Amino acid sequence: MKKLKLLLIVFTVFFSANLFAQDMMPPKPISSPVLESMAGTWVSNPYEMMGSTMTDECTQSMVLNGQFLKIDVKAKSSAGFVYEAIIMMAPSADGTITGWSYDIFGKNAITTYTGTWADNAVYLAGTSSWGSEIRNIKMQDGVMIQNVSFKMKDANGKEMPEQVASIIYNKK
């Protein structure tokens, strides 16, 4: 009798584990020619931002079964300031995208993004406790062009002058 119970328990565990595993298959990777064209390491031409000349290096790749676009950013200013960020974007097959940016300024600077992707462009709007950002990215002839606009607040909550830049990135 004990052997029968043990056999039934083993059979039940094995059978239910197989059913669970079949139901828990990951989704197909997101297929997006524009996001795939953004993969790799990119270096910006120098550009002006907040009174300094900046140069960025961004490494972008589809990760975790092609479900997320991970972006590692390291930017250096002419004044010696180094900015770093990790951005995780979650594209959907319907052309929408959401994401989050984490940087050296900590949890108060986490930015939440929403947007769309289609053809050769990505359109993003971001918000954080510091302000807002619009980022329009276009892939053109092997070059990545990012037109960005930042509206931020100072430490007292007063709106600062809008920062606008057109940043051109070339593949490293």
Image: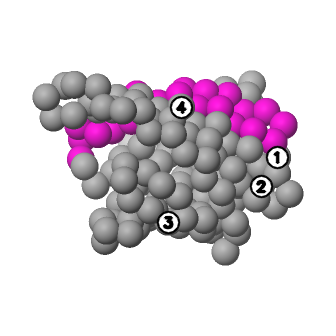
Q: Distance between the residues labelled 4 and 3?
A: 19 Å
Q: Quadrant of the N terminus?
A: top left
In the rendering, at what x and y percent does residue 83 appear? 35, 60
- Residue to which mark 1 is pinned: 33
| Residue drawn at (21%, 34%) of the image | 154
Q: Residue 161 carries which label?
A: none
Indicate the secondary structure of the residue bearing disc 1.
helix
Q: Which of 26 and 60 is in front in this view?
A: 60
Left or right: residue 69 versus residue 6 is right
- Residue to which mark 3 is pinned: 55
Q: Nearer the viewer, residue 139 or 168?
A: 168
- The answer to whether marks 4 and 3 mark residues whose Cβ atoms lie closer than 8 Å is no
Quadrant in the rendering for residue 85:
bottom left
Left or right: residue 36 versus residue 105 is right
| Residue drawn at (64%, 37%) of the image | 136
Q: How far apart are marks 4 and 1 (CA)?
A: 22 Å
Above/below status of 42 relative to 120: below
Q: Which of marks 4 and 1 is in front?
A: 4
Q: How far apart are marks 3 and 1 (CA)?
A: 26 Å
Mark 3 or mark 1, earlier in chain: 1
Q: How far apart are marks 1 and 2 (CA)?
A: 6 Å
In the rendering, at what x and y percent does residue 103 appear? 33, 51
- Residue to which mark 4 is pinned: 134
Under mark 3, the amino acid is Thr
- Residue to which mark 2 is pinned: 37
Residue 39 at least partly seen: yes
Indicate the secondary structure of the residue bearing disc 2.
helix
